[in-house]
Image: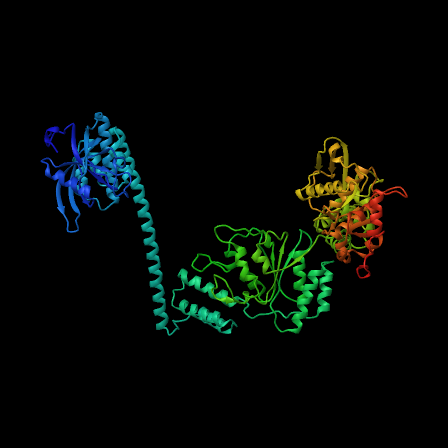
Amino acid sequence: MPKDNYTYDEHTSPSEMRLPLLPLRDVVVFPYMISPLFIGRTKSISAISEAMQQEDKYIILATQSDPDKENPTEKDIKKIGTVAKVLQMLRLPDGTVKTVVEGKFRGRILNFNPNESFFEVSVALLDEPTIGPHEKEAFTRNMIQSFEEYAELNKNISKETTENIHSIKDPAQLLYTIAGQFSFKTKDNQKLLETISLEDRLSDLIQLIKDEIVVLKTDQKIKNRIKTQMEQSQKNYYLNEQMRAIKKEMGADESEGDDLKELEKRIKKKKMSKEAAAKARQELKKLKMMTPMSAEATVVRNYIEWLISLPWYNRNKITTDIGKAEQILDEDHYGLNRPKERILEYLAVQSLMKKIKGPILCLVGPPGVGKTSLAKSVARATGREFARLSLGGVRDEAEIRGHRRTYIGAMPGKIIQSLRKTNVNNPVFCLDEVDKMSMDFRGDPSAALLEVLDPEQNFSFNDHYLDVEYDLSDVLFITTANTLPDIPLPLQDRMEIIRLPGYTEIEKYHIANKFLVPKQIRQNGLKDDHVKFSENAIFAIIRDYTREAGVRNLERQIASICRKIARAILKENPEKMVRVTKKSVEKYLGPPQYRFSQIEDKNQIGIVTGLAWTQFGGELLSIESVIMPGKGEFNVTGKLGDVMKESARAAISYVRSRSDQFNIDQKFYEKYDFHIHVPEGATPKDGPSAGIAMCVSILSALTKLPVNRGVAMTGEITLRGRILPIGGLKEKVLAAHRGGIKQVLIPKENEKDLKEIPQSVAKQVKILPVENMDEVVKHAIIVKEGESPYTEQHQQFLAKEATDTPKPIPASLKH
């Protein structure tokens, strides 16, 4: 590097110079600061070597933006650095170089000069700005006071350093000297170097020192607290050792206290599995070696207590009297025949075999149909204890399996906790709302239930807290859910699904008459001779004031009537007998809250009575069709779902394909617009079972022939006119009976479901199974005597191929 580019000596700084550059990682060297540096990169060693060859030995030190970058470029190096003098250079055996440098001036890198061996840059020296005498004195005093406060807290600062600080008068030199005594972050040091204003740099340094003082005070406070705790622990240990020595001198047993002896006796007396007994003895041995006041001793003690308190082999004697069990189930619940049959089957097998694996039953049904109360009845009928765990909102896998003992406050899962409460290992265990679990970062509780609810695995259930196997195979698990799709498929696979449909009106009447009314009379302080509910009154409450699958709202309405009667009796005559009739229900409960569909007043064109299923029961579904001159547009309204809309299109396609047989203009779809509407447009509707009703409605509108108002129908239609089976037949027929319908057309394939229809309803409603649309039209469309909606040719075909009346219901399916 040529010398004539700049001139300077030891006391005057040159204004601009060309110097080798040494990039620094995670360190900033200030002016007036002597610092050792270890150099390993080839370019950096070349730069130091070049500086050592010059007479002045100057080099510029600049910090890298990214310290992890091995080969920095011009963009990676800060523009403000320190011009330093190399005082010493020593090559080490491993090829690296140790050097000592002394910061001289601040410098700005103007540009990088071409040089392949090392970075060579043009540097402009930055003069230190001056400040007023008063500001200088204030900043100097404040900096020295802050440094002295820090030095009192940090014993690594020597007195000589503090005295040296007092001797410096120049504020810039004082700034750099003090900053060199701290381990500030690289970005903070770089800011102290880069900031132009001296006042701003002095303010920043004072703030950094104060922050370090706060951190140091907090650190010392923590250390003092830990030291105090350790001293207390050592003191407790020393006192415990003294107590042991005193007991030894007095001849007392030092190895076991009375409580440990008692614990050991309980372990020996408790009947546990071999694994659990061995674990308890092992933990007791550890407990004897611990000081009683230690935290670990408490954890071990709690663990042993849990092992001892669990019902490893405690069992309830199961009732095998099937007649008595059936009586209890019938006392508590009306209907629900399938779940009752399954419980009785289990009891029958249990009485023949000494041990069978407990079934895993899943009761699925809408709210209020008695799923949880049925589980309680099962416990009463079988003579078992009852445990219930609500899983609604559970999202932590540890709720099922427990926490490991390494966690503070760890406990077993809810399964083990519930068994401890019942104190038997064969209770009826109800896992309520199994479809309402969720999952998050803490795990998936439904996955943890897979082991609990698998009869092939739950004989060796492993709780994280116990860490020993526990046998759950004797537990009768009953889970409940509102909707099946919300239960994970692997969990469904481990359970026997039993569906509990919503109660029919007749079932609700019997439940209210036998259970709810007597219960509410008792709970409201009345007697049987105070209140009498008529049959019509109960049906009025069911139809006009409730709309539900279960009976919860029905019970609330009955309770409301009983409260009003109790008030009236106290006010008027305590011995008065009150009869609740259909008319008086409105007086107690106000105007009806709901309405149910009834038979139409007269036969009309385009209006057909369909049947629908809801979770609250069956409903009559009025379907209206009109045609008007137009261009063949087809509209379907009434908040219908996609499946129902597709059924409407299938119906009109069927009518188009058979237009020549129905005496309809074959181009009617080009001349008329069609509109199908299903009233109560705010209620969503979907499903394929209204297909034949839509087809009859369209056909009636096109032929101008009225539909028999006394006929209701349900069934899915195909493009060829076949009638496919549907679901919810029982509820639909009951809705037809309630609405005054005399005939119901059902798919032929649904004959098997007629067994579910109550005998009283089957006698009053004529149920006609049909196979195709020709049979439906024959019973639904009203024509004058001697006439037919078909052409003569098609009438002759029907006379040959079809029977005059639908096939009768087999005798085996009749009541």
Colour convention of the picture: rainbow
Q: Which is more toward the observer, 594 or 405? A: 594
Q: Which residue lies furthest to the right in this view?
A: 785
Residue depicted at 82% across the width and 61% down the height = 811
| Occupied quadrant, residue 421 | bottom right
Query: Is there any visible trace of residue 6 in the rendered image?
Result: no
For residue 694, side relative to residue 50 (left or right): right
Q: In this view, does 630 lie above or below 39?
A: above
Q: Is residue 185 above or below residue 265?
A: above
Residue depicted at 84% across the width and 46% down the height = 795
| Occupied quadrant, residue 662 | top right
Q: Position of residue 124 (x, y in %)?
A: 19, 29
Q: Which is more toward the observer, 680 or 800? A: 800
Q: Which is more toward the observer, 277 or 812? A: 812
Q: In this view, does 90 lie above or below 527?
A: above
Q: Position of residue 267 (x, y in %)?
A: 48, 71
Q: Position of residue 204 (x, y in %)?
A: 28, 34
Number of marks present in the image shown: 0
Query: Is there any visible trace of residue 759 in the rendered image?
Result: yes
For residue 241, side relative to residue 156 (left or right): right
Image quadrant occupied by the C terminus? bottom right
| Occupied quadrant, residue 475 | bottom right
For residue 9, side relative to residue 246 (left or right): left
Q: Which is more toward the observer, 178 or 682? A: 682
Image quadrant occupied by the N terminus? top left
Q: Position of residue 510 (x, y in %)?
A: 77, 55
Q: Residue furthest left?
A: 55
Q: Residue furthest top?
A: 132
For residue 473, side relative to residue 660 (left or right): left
